[in-house]
Image (cartoon, rainbow, N blue to C red):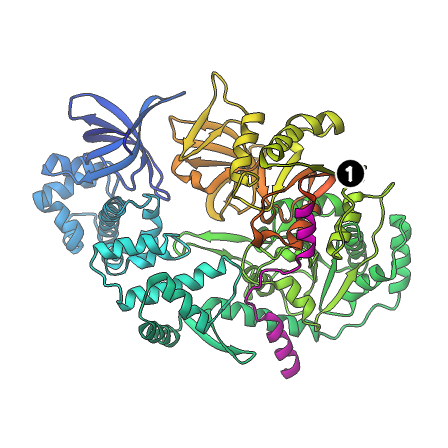
Amino acid sequence: MDNLIEIRGTVTNIIYRNEENGYCVANIELDDGGETVIVGTMPFLGAAEYISAQGNYTNHSEYGMQFAVVVVDRKLPSGLRGMYDYLSSKTVKGIGPKTARLIVDEFGEQTFYILANHPEELCKIKGISREKAFEMSYSFNQQNTMRLILDFLLKHELPLKLAAGIYSEFGEHSLKILTDNPYLLCSERFEVTFDKADEIAKKLSIGPQSAIRLRAALLYELNFNLQSGHVFIPENKLLDITHMLCDGDYFRLRQELEYLYEAGEVVRDVVADKVISYLRNYHTYENFVAESIVRLSKMTLVKPADFEKRCNDIQSSLSIKLNEEQIEALSAPFEHGISVITGGPGTGKTTTIQGLIRLFDHYGMTIALAAPTGRAAKRMTELCGVEAKTVHRLLEGTYSQKEGVMRFMRNLENPLDIDVLIVDEGSMVDMKLASSIFYALKHHTRVVFVGDKDQLPPVGSGTFFSDIVESKYVHSIKLSYVFRQGNGSEIVENAHYINAGLYPDLAKNKGDFYFASVMGTRAATDNIVSLMAERIPRAFGIPPENIQVITPTRQLRCGTHALNKLLQHALNPVKIISKEIRYGSVVFRLNDRVMQIKNNYDIVWVNPDTGEIGTGVFNGDTGIVSDIDKGAGILTVVFDEKEVNYSFDELNQIEHAYAITVHKSQGSEYDAVILPIYEIPERLMNRSILYTAITRAKKLLVIVGDEEYVHQMVDSNNKNKRYSALKTRIRYYYENT
């Protein structure tokens, strides 16, 4: 903020306005007599407004010199000419130049007061109906409210991009609502931290033991722990961690928790003799999923009489020999409404899915294939020869701007018109997504979940896949026989060794599995960079763009933060003429590999080949920076077939992806993987992280690190416990319905 330039002037006309995100381009006449073009987030900016803006001049390749606004202060125009210019610029819906002249001539200096407070007076003007008058007033007041919201955000150093969502959520009373309770900004929609809301509340004289603050702290902890995978929190633990967060009086915290129970915002339940606390919607999700699973598991089905013959035909057509486990997996959906197929790499999961597709097709059953991520769906399509969609796309997800949440068009009232649903990468399905899947199924629709229960749990909350396997009430088939390919895959073999608690043979260094022993982090990072930039491409013919560094941690010298800087320097170095933009301590360059790190349901994408337009980019999607336009303040990323424009103040949503964490790699496979196992935080030293990382490699895996660290990870089979009651609920509903 120290290097920003300040300009002052009056808006002369609006060149472009996007009412959804507030982005605006306008001409202004400067106080010193000059003129310039301003660009930035300025919702409902109108002609004749007086502005004071801070930002920087940029030279747009097509439009020339522009002033990119970072901070802006706006004032409505005064005087009859100013009022007319403002209204005639079509800033207020329903008012153009002709109507603006009639209104200003009729009400003079009272024009804005009448528009804001007495719209019925507008009906005096011929051609303005009562309905139209109130629409004008609503639009005028909406813009005034947006101005107040922007002032609030600027005053408290919050991102201006929150303005549109705040207005959508709280309407014309936004300022009063936020002034009374700034902790509302801590919701998932706005993602303001509790500490920041606390800072604002202090300025607004909200006391540390106030009911608003204590309730907000309790809700914040429940929301925050969803991100750590917990569907609920034991009541006593919730009180303890909230006490640590806000230093609230313990007795008062308990009182406010009781209030939240009574208000229905939090649900108290008892599971296994423990009192537990849920956010209301997650209590609903978990119960609905359990009830749906039990209903499907009790569905009565009769296997076709010629089933065995059809299985033999499939083996002939695919030129394969199915083992007993695979035959059982093919039989399961014809005998059970819900079934699970689980197994490690190389155990024939894809072949089994191919067999199921052929069987269902033979019996005239409609089928849909889905996976939680775009990469997983694409791989499923390529391997099975039938289109697979992401779960979000299959369920026709649309972002509700008003509610700030993803809504699925396929639900209980409008279910999918299919007989069978097969969901791959089941271990990535969290509790919320699982509920959305079951909400979208007709009563008779069978569902098959396929995955590897020994991989890491989903990024979201719960342990859905492993819970339904371990409940013992869902028919589950574990594929355990490893089908060797060619001379055998050392990656597959070692993955199974690790999963069984056995050490991989790191001395072999042959085939597709290699180990580079290093002493010291400098040696480790030097090895990683040279492997990706030179040695693997030269020795194996795999280009750097098909090589992925996967590391257990974000921190330390072998974490994503440090490695991405080194790899960017090696693979995409700064040039004399280089398109780049600095965001905080990070520099994004043209052709950088990047990843979306949070779900953004309303960002618009375009398919440059087909012209198709849609919305939504999701946590874990990776792409390439294809353009940086400093004049427009836009960075463009291509994610597979999606081209997405990010304004520069949205760059906190992406990060470099030359190196990614094991968690972010779930659902993806890469030709070559480099895996640093050196200097890892103790909490990440566990078998499932090592196993998941190794199984991401298709053709080549190189571990760089210390053999002792590898052995420690194999020995540690203590998965981080997540609070989920799905297993218990499945058992309860099965035994009591």
Q: Is disc 1 placed on a helix, strand or loop?
A: loop
Q: Is residue 50 left or right of residue 446?
A: left
Amino acid type, mark 1: Asp
Report the quarter where the C terminus lies.
Answer: bottom right
Observer-nearest residue: 682 or 512? 682
Return the x and y of residue 170 as percentages of the image width and height.
31, 57
Return the x and y of residue 503 as percentages of the image width and height.
75, 51
Figure check: 583 above or below 408? above
Residue at 89% over, 65% down: 306
Q: Which residue is mark 1?
A: 512
Residue at 89% over, 63% down: 308
Return the x and y of residue 455 as percentages of the image width and height.
67, 55
Return the x and y of residue 273 as percentages of the image width and height.
54, 81
Residue at 42% over, 30% down: 582
Report the quarter where the N terminus lies.
Answer: top left
In the image, residue 466 lies in the stretch drawn in magenta: no
Q: Is residue 161 left or right of residue 428?
A: left
Q: Residue furthest front?
A: 519
Give the total number of marks visible in the rendering.
1
Residue at 86% over, 64% down: 307
Q: Give the magenta-colored segment's residue range.
A: 708-737
| Main secondary structure along the magenta-highlighted residues | helix
